[in-house]
Amino acid sequence: MYADYVIPDLTYMERWGIPHITPAIQTKVSKIRQPTVAPLTEIVEVEGERMPISMEAFLIAVGLRLGLPGFGENGLGEGFPFTRPEHYYLAMAANLAFGDKDDGSEMLPAADEEEFRIFREARRHLPPEVFDEEVWSKSVPEELWPSVVYMINRGGRYAPASKAYKGDKLGHPWKGQWHLFVEKVAKGIDSMTGERFDGLPRYEPIKDAGGNVVDDSEYPFILSTYKEIVGGQSRTVTSPWLQASVLKENYILMNRADAERLGLQDGDRARLVSASLPNGEFDLGDGRTYRVEGRVKVVEGMRPGVVSVSWSYGHWAYGSNTVTINGVEIPGDERRASGLCANPVNRLDPVVGDVCLTDPIGGSASFYDTRVDVIKV
């Protein structure tokens, strides 16, 4: 690891945040993430304020030390300090609670006594460095505080579901111009082939970086990947607690008709092979090999001719193997290696070399263009 600074940070259960939502949601939604558990990081003091160490705490400390505008006792306006992370996030919460109209006609209802009781009881287990009602309430205008409590009790502000559609039309249609012909794409040139891209949508077979068709039809299955509901991007990739309590391993998902044809049943072990890894064994480069093997789960919901494997499992590192650091042996935990990782069978681009197939325009990995076979073991 090479870095000038390594800053301990908080997990999503320990921190504030304003997560975005997918554009597929048809109503206005503004979520607000709040600390729900006491953080495991150390408590630090920043200019007299005690708080869990985090990226925000580090930035506040730097801002205060440098005397930057926007930090300090009146950092967020006269009477509103910015010396703690919650000052910033509660200011955003106040904006959401007030609404978009300057006359205040969209302000959320004020929390009543029962709402305040729920608010306090839900946070009674948090240390004072995380939850201090007096600190929180003084972070926003006094008249807005009850509306802020009303909103954060609900985890955000949500437009009614009835606003999603107007009759059989979208309630919030796209009002920009939709281009069938994209001039910017048409002006682009493929740096590998020297040919111009087509500005019109068209179907093309799978190709490598040189524009050559990749035909792996001898492998009967298309491989797809997905993330389990408990596997959030990379944040939970090394969470053995989730694996132990929720889903101990992932599976090779397969349609029942395909499984019957191959003589496979629920729980059978199978290996994935592809044109880039025909034996299903991957050389890790340290004397070990990794076999792309896992248990089969037969489902009706998988399209015939497709198999799917989730991410976040099948680790060969991340604490799953024994390593020696500065002469000290750190034993591995084999539970962290449960399940399988399909990365090694991804189709390599024969032109580029040790890189998977990629989208020639966007450059992203081509996740669904690998064909595999499933071998019972």
Image (cartoon, rainbow, N blue to C red):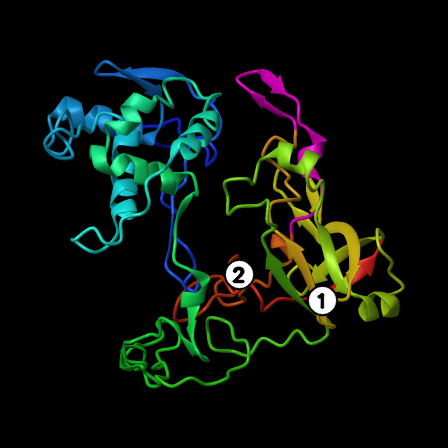
Residue 17 visible here: no
Q: Please identify, in this view, whether the residue under mark 1 or under mark 2 is nearer the observer.
A: 1
Q: Residues within 10 Å of mark 1 (few under 14, many from 20)?
A: some
Q: Which residue is mark 2?
A: 356
Question: Above or below — where is 298 with respect to 171?
Answer: above
Specify the amino acid type for callout 1. Answer: Met
In the image, residue 260 lies in the stretch drawn in magenta: no
Separation of residues labelled 1 and 2 (CA atoms): 24 Å
Location of residue 261 in the rendering, given as x and y in whole percent from the top left corner:
87, 70
Labelled pair 1, 2 in contact (Cβ < 8 Å):
no
Placement of the N terminus among the 4 image quadrants:
top left
Q: Which residue is mark 1?
A: 302
Location of residue 215 in the rendering, given as x and y in whole percent from the top left corner:
62, 77
Q: Is residue 162 left or right of residue 77?
A: right
Q: Is residue 99 left or right of residue 20?
A: left
Q: Between 354 and 233, which is closer to the camera in this rendering? A: 233
In the image, residue 324 lies in the stretch drawn in magenta: yes
Of all residues, the one furthest to the right in this rendering is: 263
Residue depicted at x 63% and y 53%: 310
Specify the amino acid type for callout 2. Answer: Cys
Residue depicted at x 64% and y 39%: 316
Q: Between 300 and 222, which is closer to the camera in this rendering? A: 300
Q: Please report the bounds of the magenta region as a residue range.
A: 322-341
Residue depicted at x 40% and y 31%: 113
> Which sits earlier in the primary sequence, circle 1 or circle 2?
1
Query: Of helix, strand and loop, which one carries label 1?
Result: loop
Question: Above or below — where is 65 with respect to 367?
Answer: above
Quadrant of the rendered image containing residue 325:
top right
Query: Of helix, strand and loop, which one carries label 2?
Result: loop
Residue 185 visible here: yes
Q: Is residue 237 left or right of residue 8?
A: right
